[in-house]
Structures are given as C-alpha cells and as structure tokens.
Image: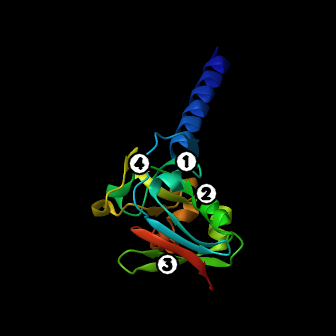
Amino acid sequence: MRLLRQLSLACVLSLSSLSLFAQTGAPQAVSLSALPAGKTVLTVKGTNGVRKFSIAELENLGTHRLNTKTFWPADDGTYEGVLLSTILKQAGIESSEAIRVRARDGFSQIIPRQDWEKWPILLATRRAGNAIPTRDKGPLRIIYPRDMSPELADTLYRLRWVWLVDLIEPAGK
C-alpha cells in the first residue's frame, strides 16, 4: 500500500511537471485568427533582397505561443508570434554570423547566430492573443524562452530582448 501511494505521488508530480513545461517551456505551434493585412511593420534585409512584412504576412509564416518570465515582471506572460529562425530563413540570412535587430527609437542589438540556433526565439506579434500596441513596446518584440533554461536569466541576454522592432539585417560581430 505504501509503495502504491509513493507511485501515485510520483505520477502526480510527473504530470505537474509536464503541465508546467507546456506552460513555460519551448514555444508551441498555434493557429491564430487572421489579422487584417495592415501596414508594413518590419523590414528584413537579406540575400533574398529586402522584404517588408505586415503583421498578417509575418504570421502567415507560422505562429507559436510562448509563456515565459521576462526581465521585467510586468511583461511576464504569454506571447504569440513567429520564430526568428523562420524569418531569417525567409530572408536567406539564417547562416549569418549575427544579425542586427533595430527598434523604431534607434536602439539596436546584435544577436549572434548561436542564439537562434540554440533557442527558439520569438518575434512576438501578439501578447495573450492581442496585437501589441506601440505603447506596450509593440508591435513587434524579441522574446527569448527564458523559462527554458537558467542560462537565459543571465543579464547577457537582457539587452537582446528588443522591442519596437522594425528592421532585421545581417551584422558582423
């Protein structure tokens, strides 16, 4: 009987862990209701030329959902969007040593290739299912799956969470 109780408890704990991972682990593929085509929100410069995307065009590349903590507790939560690696592949720059991600306010950050090869980084187009307004650091934000690994809590990654994203292009390190 004691063994049965221990096995039951182990099963409950395992199921709890799986549920937690599903909520805070890697991004999960999702289908979202289509948004209106709208205006261009992102320019990507690559070997396939310059591509301009609306949010609807980005989301047509395939969407994922991620529930994660951020470096800013008020921003913790659920985000939806396109994997950065998918966008880079579309532009023909997935094998670049690094990319520069620029924000509308002029801020920019270099993200090295090992980041998008190791982590399923999201270019978020929505937060909790809703378009991200500019006043909330939108319409596009880089979101790392911080809860996947303690490594992503390192402040090294903090500046790479660019918001107000409007340009992605290859960059030297």
User: Mark 3 is on which residue type?
Assistant: Gln
Disc 3 to disc 4, how far (Cα)? 29 Å
What residue would you read off at disc 1?
64
What whole-number distance in Å separates the C-alpha atoms at marks 4 and 2?
26 Å
Residue 173 image-quadrant placement: bottom right
- Name the residue carrying label 3: 109
Q: Secondary structure at mark 3?
A: strand
Question: Could one spot residue 25 in this view of the protein?
Answer: no
**Could you tell me which residue is drawn at 43 percent across and 62 percent down?**
140
Where residue 129 appears, x then y in whole percent? 40, 44
**Position in image of residue 70 (x %, y %):** 43, 59
Give the CA distance from mark 4 to mark 1.
19 Å
Q: Seen in the image, is 94 located left or right of residue 36?
A: right
| The N terminus lies in quadrant | top right
Chain-order first, disc 4 or disc 1 = 4
Classify residue 50 by image quadrant.
Answer: bottom right
* Label 4: which secondary element: loop
Q: Is residue 11 above or below residue 120?
A: above
Q: Which residue is mark 2?
A: 120
Residue holding disc 4: 36
